[in-house]
C-alpha cells in the first residue's frame, strides 16, 4: 500500500477553489492523508483535532508532527509547568485521531544538533516509554546517525524500539543533512519525506524568508521516477509506504505528488467530494 500526501493543507493553491473557506475538505478531495505541521509550533486542543476528523472522510488519515519541545528544538520549561503536562496535552490532542483509527503516525523530526550520542539514544528510549505503543516515526537531521560505523546500529535501534524509519530526500549540505537510506525498520510502515534539493535555500533555516526559500524546489520527471522505483523497493520491506511532499515554498508539492501518483499508477477511493464553487453550474 502506498499513501501519498502533503505537508499541511493551507499552502497548496492549485487544490482550492478561489478564496476557499474549506481548504481541509478541498485537500481531502485530492489526497488521502496529510502531515499536520502546526502541532510542531503549538499543541492543538482536542476540540480542534476532533473537528479535523469530523471534516474529513473515514478513510482520511493524519501524520502529526511532535511538538518542538518533544524533539529538543526548544525546552519544555518555556511552555509548560512540567514535562509530564506537555506529554499529557499532546496525548489528549491526538486522542480523537487515534481513537477513531485516523492517526497514521507521530513524526519526531529532530534538529541538526541532535547527533548520535549515548544521551540521545537514551532519549529515544525514553520516548518509546512515554508514548506507549503509538506509531512513532523518527527523522534525523544529523549525519552522525548514518556514518559507515553507525548506520547499521541506528537502524537496529529504531527496529528494536518499534520506530518507523523516515527516509528523506533533502539537499546534501553540511552535517545537518542526512543521506537517502532505503531501509525499513518497521514491518507495518515506512515514511518518506521529500524536502526538495534546493541547497542554497536549505541553508537559510534561520532566515526571515525561510518559508519562501527553504523548500523551493520542483522535482523533475527523472527524479519522480527515481522515487517511484525507491518506493517499489521499500514495499518489499514494509506493508505501507507513506510519502509526504514537503517542497511547499513554491507551491510545487501538490503537482509533484500528483505526478508521483501517476508514475505509480495509483488511484484513491473514498476521497472527500470536492467543494462546489458557488458560481459553477
Image: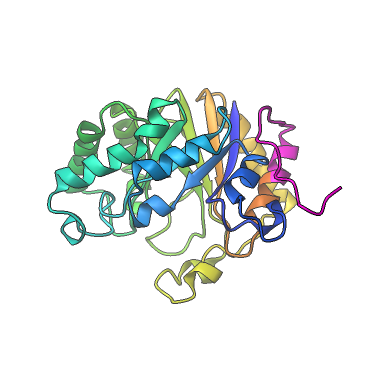
Q: Quadrant of residue 77?
A: bottom left
Q: Which residue is drawn at 71% across and 56% down?
A: 14
Q: Which quadrant holds residue 131?
A: top left
Can the viewer see residue 118 in this picture? no
Tell whether 76 sits left or right of 91: left
> Residue 281 at what x, y percent from top left?
87, 47
Q: From the top left corner, tell me how far across and down residue 229 is, in percent.
A: 65, 36
Q: Residue drawn 37% across and 53% down?
A: 40
Residue drawn 47% across the image and 50% down it: 179
The N terminus, quarter of image:
top right
Q: Residue 37 colored magenta? A: no
Instruction: Indicate whether residue 266 is drawn in magenta.
Output: yes
Say whether residue 250 is left or right of residue 143: right
User: Which one is nearer the viewer's eye here, 70 or 11?
Assistant: 11
Q: Main secondary structure of the magenta part?
A: loop
In this rendering, is residue 281 above or below 78?
above
Residue 280 in view (yes/no): yes
Tell which of 184 and 78 is nearer to you.
78
Q: Give the range drawn in magenta.
A: 258-281
Seen from this angle, which residue lies furthest left?
Answer: 82
Q: Residue at x 19, y 61 (%)?
A: 78
Q: Residue furthest right?
A: 281
Amino acid at each position: 500500500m502506498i499513501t501519498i500526501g502533503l505537508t499541511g493543507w493551507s499552502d497548496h493553491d492549485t487544490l482550492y477553489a478561489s478564496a476557499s473557506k474549506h481548504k481541509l475538505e478541498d485537500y481531502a478531495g485530492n489526497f488521502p492523508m496529510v502531515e499536520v505541521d502546526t502541532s510542531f509550533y503549538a499543541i492543538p486542543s482536542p476540540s480542534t483535532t476532533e473537528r479535523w476528523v469530523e471534516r474529513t472522510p473515514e478513510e482520511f488519515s493524519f501524520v502529526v508532527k511532535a511538538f518542538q519541545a518533544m524533539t529538543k528544538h526548544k525546552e519544555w520549561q518555556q511552555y509548560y509547568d512540567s514535562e509530564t503536562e506537555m506529554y499529557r496535552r499532546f496525548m489528549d490532542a491526538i486522542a480523537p485521531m487515534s481513537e477513531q483509527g485516523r492517526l497514521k503516525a507521530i513524526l519526531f523530526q529532530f534538529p541538526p544538533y541532535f547527533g548520535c550520542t549515548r544521551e540521545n539514544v537514551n532519549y529515544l528510549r525514553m520516548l518509546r516509554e512515554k508514548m506507549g505503543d503509538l506509531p512513532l516515526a523518527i527523522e534525523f537531521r544529523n549525519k552522525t546517525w548514518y556514518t559507515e560505523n553507525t548506520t547499521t546500529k541506528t537502524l537496529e535501534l529504531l527496529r528494536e524500539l518499534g520506530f518507523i524509519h523516515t527516509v528523506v530526500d533533502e539537499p546534501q549540505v553540511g552535517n545537518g543533512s542526512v543521506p537517502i537510506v532505503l531501509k525499513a525498520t518497521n514491518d507495518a510502515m515506512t515514511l518518506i519525506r521529500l524536502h526538495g534539493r534546493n541547497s542554497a535555500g536549505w541553508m537559510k533555516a534561520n532566515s526571515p524568508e525561510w518559508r519562501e526559500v527553504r523548500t523551493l524546489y520542483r522535482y523533475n520527471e527523472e527524479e519522480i521516477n527515481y522515487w517511484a522505483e525507491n518506493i517499489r523497493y521499500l514495499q518489499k520491506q514494509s506493508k505501507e509506504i507513506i510519502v509526504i511532499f514537503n517542497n511547499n515554498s513554491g507551491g510545487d508539492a501538490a503537482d509533484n505528488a500528483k505526478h508521483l501518483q501517476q508514475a505509480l499508477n495509483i488511484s484513491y477511493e473514498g476521497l472527500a467530494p470536492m467543494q462546489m464553487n458557488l458560481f459553477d453550474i
